[in-house]
Every structure is written in C-alpha cells, then in structure tokens.
Image: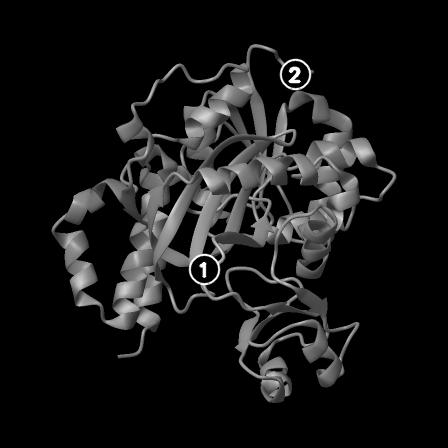
Amino acid sequence: MINPAVYTTLLVSYLDFFDAPGEIPFMFKKAGHKVVVFCCETSWLKSNKFHDEWIDASKDKQEFASALIKLIKEKGNTFNKVMLLDDETIKLITDNISDDEVELFKKIMPITKIENREMLSSKIGMSRVFERNGIKTPRYINYADEKDTEAITTKVDFPVLLKVDFSFSGIGIRKCEAPEDLKSKLDELHDSTNVVIQEFITGDDVGVEALFEQGKLICYQCARVMSYMNNQFSFTTKRTYYRNKKVEEILIQLGERVGLNSFASIGFIYHKERDAYYLIEVDARTNSWMPYSRFTNHSFIDGLREIATGKKSAKVLSEKEENREIEIAIFDRDMRRCMKTKDFGGMLKWVYNYKGYWQFIPFYDKIFFKRILRKMIFDFLKIKY
C-alpha cells in the first residue's frame, strides 16, 4: 500500500542508449519524492545517485512490457505516480494495454483519456487527436491513405514536411519543396509506408516543456531555440527561456482536452504575420532540458513538489523575475556540436564560463558526469576532420 507520508514515483525507461533519462531522477528526488527506477542495468536511468531503488528489467521488449504491467497490476498501489520517460517505452507499453483496461492505462500511461491513445505512438494519430479537439496545427494528410500526387496537392500546400509515423529526435523527417520532389524525398526515409505529410509553416521554432497533473497545467518552460545539433529538425543544444502567456493559454487547453498527466516535450511554430502559434508535436515524456529549469524562476522541481504535497509554492515573483530571460546550454550536447561544426568560439564560451555556462556542467552527480564524459570522448573520436 502507498505510504501517505512518502510520495513514491516509479520512473520507467526501456532504452539503454538514450541519455535523456539520466538526470530525471534528480528532479523528483529534490522535490521530495521517493524515486524507484525500472530499467535494465546499463540504462542511463540508473546512472545517477538520485534513485532510492532499482528494479532490474529485461532488455527483451516483450519481457520488459510484461514485467512492468505485472508489477502495476500486483503492486501498483505502492506507487503514487508512474512515468514513462521515452517514446520507445511509451509505444511498447501502450501496444500491450487493451482498450478495456482503462484503469491500468490511466495508472501507467501519460494521458488519462484512453480515447486519445493514438497520439502516444503515432504522428498521424497525434494530428487526428489535435484536429478533433480543436487544436491549431498545420494541415496534414496520411500518405498511406492518399498516394496520388495531384490529389495530395489539393489537400496541402507545398512545401511540406514528410514525417515517419513513429520517430523521435528529428530522425525520419524530410522537407519537400515541390510535388515533383515527393517521390525522391520519400525514398530517403527509412519507412516510406507510414508517413504523415504536413504543411511546412514558415516561422520561429518555439520549444516548450510542461508538467501536467490530471489534465491540469502545473508549470511550463518556453524557449527560443538558439542552436541545433545538425539542422532544425534535430535536437537542440542551446536555448533562451522566457515566459509566453499565449503559449500558456494553449497549454491549459491542450492539457484539458487531451488529458495530459505527465511531463510533455512540445514544439510550436510561431507565424509572425498571422500572430498564430501552430502546435507541431507533443511528446508526452521527459526530455534533457527539464532538469535545467532549476536555473530559471519556474523550476519543475517546484511543480513536482506541488503534485506530491498538494500545495503551491509560496514563492512570490516580481514582474522582472517573472519575465526574466535566461540562456541555457546542455554541456555535452553543445560541446559535441562545437566539435562537429568546428565552432571554436562556442568552445571558448565553455572554457571562459560565458554567462555562467559552468553551472550547466553536471558536477553535482559524479556517477552521471563520468558517464557523460565517456560518451563525449567516444563521440569525439568518431568525428572526422
């Protein structure tokens, strides 16, 4: 049974090569949660000093899913919260829960409305959920349903983005400028059968992280993207965080209509001429930026503490503090970008502690820091000069 004096969270990750979960237990621990991790021995989720217990999980997909579902069915009442931390895990578990297992779904999955489950492992499904819930997104079609180029041009305007139905970290996305380029761009994708064709909106990328509880927005971070690892469809290495009331209003509606009940990594495109924000993507899971919210006045640690205690933070911010902008970079990502692109000026920013960059180096956790260094060295050795 759940101990009411200790708020216990189960963090789950199937992937062992994905580094984003490595710093996630830190946030929960600092918020006063008891942290239990469910993963294999080599997982990044275990590579930190901030988890209280580790439940050993198989590297076999089906065995992993079966063991987690069995754990929740038999001992689910020992956990106040269950969080799936990556896209592969979310897809794996949702594929193993049937539509009639509503309570199990609500306990494990990052949304409470099972009728919206198709958004969790499908970009096509996500677009459908947004459309029927009145959420503004670029126009789209499912390539599997419509393969005639002339018919496609009557439904969406080019240029378009081609997105593999299940993909993450910018993999499986191509920009197609004109109808005559459609076939060649589709051939570049690793899966050209399950593709969503989405209108390309020219505008500013807006990166958002948010925390929801039972459909309610608890807190959020909004950012202008300053640099990407490769291109605008790849993951980001540097951002400037700020407050955005229009985005906040959209997030409130999004949480309520979809039933979000977890962290979410969200992408918008802002069209200046229309003064409109188009929702591009919602991944109902954590990302690498979330632990860095502690360097702003809107930390997710405070949000997690509010969920555990039921009490809002008593911290009162001045207008200047509320709207303060702060530049944040992820150490290993940005250094890898600098090495890859030969951005020596960017490297010097880390050397000389530009704008306090040293505070973003994860010295606070020796276990995580050592693994990050090993990964960086391995990646540097692969770079061809």
Residue 237 can be seen, yes or no: yes
Where residue 188 appears, as percent x and y from the top left, is 58, 81
Q: Residue furthest left?
A: 352
Q: Earlier in the sequence, mark 2 or mark 1?
A: 2
SS of the residue under disc 1: loop
377 to the left or right of 176: left
Q: Position of residue 236 (x, y in %)?
A: 39, 57
Residue kind at label 2, given as amino acid type: Ile
Residue corresponding to mark 2: 2
**Tag 1 residue:** 273
Local SS, label 2: loop
* Marker disc for residue 355: none
Circle 1 Cα neighbour tier, 10 Å, few/some/many (<14 / 14–19 / ≥20): few
Under mark 1, the amino acid is: Glu
Give the residue displayed 58% in from the left and 73% down from the top.
160
378 sits left or right of 216 in the view: left
- Figure quadrant of the C terminus: bottom left
Q: Determine whether 65 is above or below 121 in the image.
A: above
Of residues 230 and 24, the one nearer the viewer is 230
Vertical placement of residue 354 versus 38, above or below: below
Measured in 3D between alpha carbons, the distance from the residue under mark 2 to the one under mark 1, in whole angstroms, is 52 Å
Q: Is residue 346 left or right of residue 97?
A: left
Q: Position of residue 223 (x, y in %)?
A: 39, 47
The residue depicted at 51 percent of the width and 53 percent of the height is 276
Whether residue 18 appears in this view of the structure is no
Give the percent coordinates (x, y) of residue 179. 62, 84
Classify 291 as above or below 378: above
| Number of marks present in the image shown | 2
